[in-house]
Amino acid sequence: MTRKGPADGDKMETNENGNFTYILRCADGTLYTGWTNDLKKRLDAHNAGQAAKYTRGRTPVELAYAEAHGTKQEAMRREAQIKKLSRKEKEALIQGYQGFPAVWEPPAGTEDGA
């Protein structure tokens, strides 16, 4: 498992060999856990109401946590582990999360980030 945060300065790979386990914070404050091979596309689908039934009535959702994995199986296994955690344990996991900022906000000084 690898997690990349702001200190890494790397852009997140979104579909080439990328498998991610993620937690979303829904508009009603609930948490949703899933896995994908394209994190940005999946987040967009959740917010468009075209992903999991659970999140359709709870938009907008925001990425609260994500982990990168080498294989689909690893991502799915980690999803199952996280789903078994209590709300308090999930919040602790989220609290230490540093994010994938290059996907969600362009770094300052780049063409897109001004």
Image: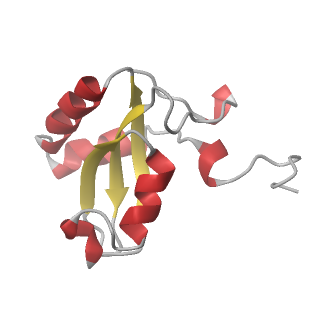
Left or right of residue 58, residue 97 in this image: right
For the N terminus, give its image quadrant: top left
Residue 88 vs residue 46, the one in the foreground: 46
Q: Residue at x 26, y 59 (%)?
A: 31
Quadrant of residue 9 within the rendered picture:
top right
Q: Residue at x 15, y 37 (%)?
A: 80
Residue 110 vs residue 87, the one in the foreground: 110
Classify 42 as above or below 72: below
Residue 13 showing in the rendered view: yes
Residue 61 showing in the rendered view: no
For the C terminus, give its image quadrant: bottom right
- Please, which residue is most extreme toward the bottom here? 57
Quadrant of residue 56 within the rendered picture:
bottom left
Classify 96 as above or below 24: above
Q: Residue at x 19, y 51 (%)?
A: 87
Residue 27 vs residue 102, the one in the foreground: 102
Left or right of residue 82, residue 41 in this image: right
Pinpoint residue 105: horizontal percent, then vertical percent.
67, 54
Classify 58 as above or below 94: below
- Please, which residue is most extreme toward the left here? 84
Left or right of residue 25, residue 106 in this image: right
Pinpoint residue 109: horizontal percent, then vertical percent.
89, 47
User: In the rendered picture of this protein, how many numbered marks are placed on residues?
Assistant: 0
Pinpoint residue 26: horizontal percent, then vertical percent.
33, 67
Q: How is the image coloured?
A: secondary structure
Q: Residue at x 86, y 47 (%)?
A: 110
